Image (spheres, grey):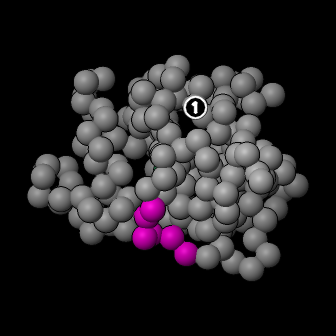
């Protein structure tokens, strides 16, 4: 028995199945982790986080009328494989074997210089609860580094990018408050 994984589900994450996923293309090799940030509604201070709305968004159960901001994302069907809350709590919505809907139209140039589009096909998406430009918590970095270590057991040769790097005209997450050097130090 694999002590870390069950069919692409991480045993140490809280599982909450999203209907928003599909199969990866045949022969897709997962070699990319996309770091995102998300906050619903966008938090103005630390106390605003943790309302559970991201989990509702990813499971198509968000009440679009509950907050004026939700109107701007009405009817979006999205998901990520993982969400890490400010407390470090880790959630999983889609098996890593499947294709979650987190990156949208996107393009990644790998270390060999090959340009690959549609990053959802070959990536794992991790959302950190937060607002672009703001920093993230120590608990989030700790959860993220354990998760990355576990992912490296399943997927070899993984690279890390931000959503802002693969969709630069559309996206600015996770933003300047994310400490890439810290991620790379933790991952080795
Ligand atoms: Zn994003």
Is the N terminus in the top left, top right, bottom left or bottom right quadrant?
bottom right
| Relative image position of residue 114 (x, y in whole percent) | 82, 62
Would you place residue 80 above or below residue 51 in this image? Answer: below
Q: Look at 88% across and 55% down and name the residue there.
A: 112
Q: Which residue is mark 1?
A: 143
| Relative image position of residue 89 (x, y in whole percent) | 46, 34
| Relative image position of residue 57 (x, y in whole percent) | 32, 57
What kind of secondary structure does the magenta stretch mostly adopt?
loop
Would you place residue 120 above or below residue 163 in this image? Answer: below
Q: Look at 76% across and 51% down and name the residue there.
A: 2
**Label 1 CB-ligand 1 distance < 8 A:** no
- Residue 166 appears in view: no
> Is 21 colored magenta in this rendering?
yes
Would you place residue 117 above or below residue 16 in this image? Answer: below
In the rendered structure, the answer to whether residue 73 lies left or right of residue 162 reads left
Pick the front one: 151 or 32: 151
Pick the front one: 14 or 22: 14
Q: Quadrant of residue 76?
A: bottom left
| Range drawn in magenta | 17-22
- Toward the top, the furthest residue is 138
Is the C terminus in the top left, top right, bottom left or bottom right quadrant?
top right
């Amino acid at each position: 028995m694999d002590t870390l994984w069950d069919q692409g589900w991480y045993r140490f994450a809280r599982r909450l199945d999203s209907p928003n996923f599909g199969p990866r293309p045949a022969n897709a090799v997962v070699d990319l982790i996309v770091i995102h940030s998300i906050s619903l509604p966008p938090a103005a201070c630390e106390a605003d986080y943790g309302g559970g709305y991201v989990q509702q968004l990813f499971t198509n159960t968000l009440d679009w009328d509950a907050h004026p901001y939700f109107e701007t994302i009405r009817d979006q069907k999205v998901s990520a494989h993982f969400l890490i809350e400010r407390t470090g709590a880790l959630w999983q919505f889609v098996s890593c074997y499947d294709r979650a809907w987190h990156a949208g139209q996107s393009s990644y140039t790998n270390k060999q210089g090959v340009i690959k589009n549609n990053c959802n096909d070959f990536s794992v998406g991790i959302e950190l609860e937060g607002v672009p430009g703001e920093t993230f918590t120590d608990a989030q970095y700790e959860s993220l580094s354990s998760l990355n270590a576990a992912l490296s057991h399943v997927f070899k040769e993984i690279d890390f990018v931000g959503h802002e790097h693969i969709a630069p005209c559309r996206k600015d997450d996770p933003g300047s408050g994310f400490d890439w050097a810290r991620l790379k130090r933790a991952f080795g």
